[in-house]
Image: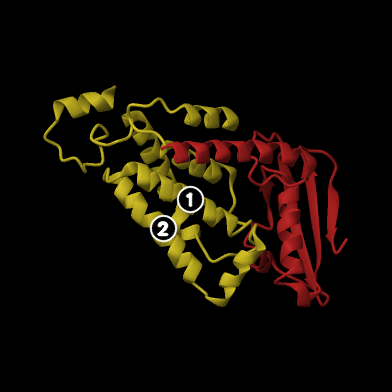
Chain colours: A yellow, B red
Amino acid sequence: MVLSSIEQNYPWLPKFYPWRSDTTEMRWNILVMCKLLLVILILNGFIWKIGDPYIPHLSFLDMFQDFPGTYKTAMRVAFAIPAGFLLINYKPRLMCFILGIAIILILLASKSIFRNHIFICACVFLMSSIYKRETFPVLSSFNWELFI
Amino acid sequence: MRIGLVLAWLFIASQVVLIVYSRFIPERFFCWAPFDEQTVYTINVVIDGNSLSMEEVEKRYRYSPDAIEPRAIDNIFSIVEQYEKTYGKTDNAKVSITYSTNGHPSKTWYYPQ
């Protein structure tokens, strides 16, 4: 409610202003949740933990060992660009989808980097990408039930 | 939208399957249900009679060699075993992990077993 009052009081703020959450195709509360999770991941230095496949969950990912830096660079780009666009409210549903897929691919590439909370973030991004603002996010609720 | 919903249902179903599957295997990857175990562990690696330092062990597995694991200790066994069977196959390393779960008496896991 505080956020929506900010938006009512300052309607002249540009649509891409990161504190605005009423200008997109997503529900404002879902968008705020995604942005907060993203900020936590960034502050946690997640992007610097992304590396080439190393002791992967799927053994075929080891083929990227022959092309050092390729997987790491691709995944860092796949994380950083949607993260930036999500923060400025540009196509947030699409950006959440890309972020969710990218994080799962990053986790699949290394058992050492796997953490439950990062996987939960990926699930939240994916589930948040499905619904438009006029639809109640039923599957997100189901997924949260599974987390709990 | 409909395809998206179908995929989302499949994604949730896959999580349920993974949670059920995890009941039958020791590892706890991709099944993030609350896990009330804390395991204090230390990893020791010996190659050709020489013990690796903590830094070398951490560099080898990219995992802390001496810490508290809030998830299943089998996750660490899995990391060590996979490394020694693939990247470190020619090292013939002897690995031992001493661990204590929830304050219970210490146990030791060896590779090769």
Spot occupied by residue B61 in the image (x, y as percentages of width and height): 66, 63
Question: Residue A63 or B52: which is nearer the viewer?
Answer: A63
Kindly identify the amino acid type of the residue bearing the numbered disc 1.
Ile
Chain that bears disc 1: A
Question: Residue A30 or B94: which is nearer the viewer?
Answer: A30
Location of residue B33 by image quarter: top right
Chain that bears disc 2: A
Residue drawn at (59%, 55%), measured in percent from left and top? Answer: A108
- Callout 1: few (<14), some (14-19), or many (20+) C-alpha neighbours within 10 Å? some
Question: Residue A62 or B27: which is nearer the viewer?
Answer: A62
Q: Residue furthest top?
A: A1
Q: CA distance from mark 1 to mark 2?
A: 9 Å
Residue drawn at (56%, 40%), measured in percent from left and top? Answer: B11
Residue tagged 2: A78
The label on residue A101 is 1
- Callout 2: few (<14), some (14-19), or many (20+) C-alpha neighbours within 10 Å? some
- Label 1–label 2 contact, CB within 8 A: yes
Q: Residue furthest left?
A: A12
Kindly identify the amino acid type of the residue bearing the numbered disc 2.
Ala
Name the quarter where the C terminus of chain A is drawn.
top right
Name the quarter where the N terminus of chain A is drawn.
top left
Quick check: A110 above or below B22?
Answer: below
Residue drawn at (21%, 28%), measured in percent from left and top? Answer: A6
Spot occupied by residue B4 in the image (x, y as percentages of width and height): 45, 40
Spot occupied by residue A85 in the image (x, y as percentages of width and height): 30, 50
Residue drawn at (21%, 42%), measured in percent from left and top? Answer: A17
Disc with the residue nearer the chain's start (1 vs 2) = 2
